[in-house]
Image: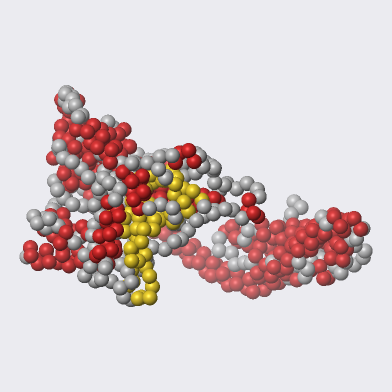
Amino acid sequence: MLNNSSDKIKKEFENLRNELLDLTLRNQLLNFKTRARTITISNQSPINIYQTLVLQNNKMYFVANKKEKKEEKSGFSIWDHAPFDLSRFTDGDKTLSTDLTPNELQKRLFYINNQAKTMLQEQGYNILYLAVGFLEWRDNTKPKQVNHAPLVLIPVAMERKKVGKSFNLEWTGEDIQTNISIKAKLKENGIDFPDFEFKKYGEAIDHYLREVRDSVRGMNEWKVNTNIALGFFSFTKFVMYNDLNPEAWENNVDLTKNELIQAIFNPSINDKEAFKEEDIDSQLEYSKMYQVLDADSSQIAAIQDVKVGRNLVVEGPPGTGKSQTIVNLIAELLAEGKSVLFVSEKMAALDVVKDRLTGVGLGKFILELHSHKTRRKKFLKDLEKATTVRSQEPMNIDQTIRKLETLRQQLDDYAEIIHKPLYEVQLSAFQLYGLKEAADEHFSRSNRIIPLVRFSHPETLTLKDLDDITISLENLAELYQTISKENPWSKCAPKSLLPADLREIEQLINDTLHALDDFLVERGRVYDIYGIKKPETLNEFEKSLSAFDIISSKNSELIDGDILKSGAWNNNNDDAYRLIKELDKYQKAAKSLDKFNSGIFSADIDRLIGQVQESAHKKLSRLFGNKPHIELVERYYQGPVPKSPEDVIFDLEQAKQVILIKNQLDANKSFARKYYGDYWYLGANINDFKRNSKMDE
């Protein structure tokens, strides 16, 4: 079973390696091309670069060989190259000459520096290298194309003391890299490509270039040159590619049998029972907990799972305490004497955890292995400092621990009491109090005081008894809704009734029912003849009688039958009054349209206003006395156009408002006729509407 699992993992490793490996000509390490983010050095030899930059650890400086064109020299540019102090180059040649103008060089250096720093700060690794020596080779897929692969890559960093000064270049102190991409590519062709080994003499790099020439001597038209260029190169994926190669592992190492690797590819191995949040108080002791930040029950459970060796993934949106949990977990593992490797794709996550650990006094245990702040010397210094930390006497916190244990026990007892089911109803005090609070809130919303109900023996009530009481109250509430204050039997409290009384009551009820049937017939006739709404209640019946009074009055005017039948006046009359106000507003403002002909209704008034305003601001028009605004609007005026553009704009604004009101009235025409029938039109008498609507009262 284990062998099958190992074979499966090796196969997955091979698939992952194929995805990581980029041996196409898109790779800069196989097909280097000069572009905007590269700089070619024209004056240096590989020996001098290696001697000055690496062995002597000196800084080197960029120089622009190309002069600016005459038309480009005028004026000031932020990219102007600062003049060089040539006295700095007395000890050997430290210049890096480029076939660029000063402005071009500064722009390119500024871009390269920003990109390299951004990658270093966000991802934690350097991508800026000085490539020394190139292999000119041809790929079988494109035999006519000459590709240039860098051979030795020196990790470098750029800096300038202040804005306006030139950039300099220095070795970061990190390992000098061999081009492992070209090595893997040539291995496919059976070529054993040599690795560069660091040596403390300048000729070492020339010796390496000679070794490369010897290794490719049998390849037709392949050459090794001594070109030097600055550019971006990334080795991260190729490093992972090599790490997943079983042939690169040591004899006693087999990653496929590693417990963590096995768990990733076979999750059932990690199928351990997770620590339950509810077991925290019963299974954990304060004396064995070393959290340095606040933690809730879910975070403590996750920490316990990790401490017992359970592999897990903690997910959650930002702000849910993931970094806080990591800090607590590191503190717990440090207390057990363990080392922790904390890895993150983003530097921001590393900084957050580091700052929090430093804030709680654990900063001296942190060793930055890989970041933009880490250099070999600083790493060794930090390592020495960490190993010489003096141990401190353990603090005597036994009393504090006992106090915390007592407090936790009291809280646990309280929680157990309020959640314990009580009496026959088997509801806890927490549940009963919640029911009481919900009832209080209900009566508070309706501005009423909750009534008090007394039970003789409440402890004997069961949950079924409560359900029966609730159903009875719901039935009573439903019945109460049908009994209003206008009910004929309201406040009626008859005493004992004799049989004769019952017969009399029965006769009265029958007579009332017959009379009610006759009334309903007459009600239908009234509706058919006069259009009066059929009354359903006593109040509506009284309103119907008022309508009869109006109809029977000798002074009443004839009313359009459609108005009576529409039923519009039976509802809220606010819309009717609003329509009258809009019509009144239109009639008062409609005189402003007398200046215009009917064409104004189809004109784009906003556009006309804008054109008139634009013509009014033209200086030449005012200078020669022309009136372009008159030509714009004279076809809409019935009479002469005002000479002032301001007067024209005022007229157009008024016309716009009136047309807007008219359009709204036209849109509501059918709605208005429900209230006023054929009496409604734009020229109708407003006073008649007001009198009929009783607005004057």
Between 148 and 369, the one lying in front of the other is: 148
**Residue pictured at 85% horizontal, 68% vertical:** 636
**Residue pictured at 49% horizontal, 41% vertical:** 86
Question: Would you identify the image quadrant in which residue 474 lies?
Answer: bottom left
Scheme of image coloration: secondary structure
Question: Would you identify the image quadrant in which residue 227 lies?
Answer: bottom left
Q: Give residue 6's position: percent from left, percent from top.
A: 11, 63
**Residue pictured at 44% horizontal, 53% vertical:** 43
- Asked if residue 443 can be seen in this view, the reply is no
- Asked if residue 634 can be seen in this view, the reply is yes
**Residue pictured at 20% horizontal, 60% vertical:** 244
Between 161 and 586, the one lying in front of the other is: 161
Q: Give residue 229's position: percent from left, percent from top.
A: 40, 56
Q: Is residue 35 above or below residue 279?
A: below
Question: Would you identify the image quadrant in which residue 28 lies?
Answer: bottom left
Q: Give residue 149's position: percent from left, percent from top.
A: 34, 63
Q: Is residue 241 left or right of 50 when viewed as pictured?
A: left
Considering the image in quadrants, where does the N terminus appear? bottom left
Q: Give residue 92's position: percent from left, percent from top.
A: 40, 43
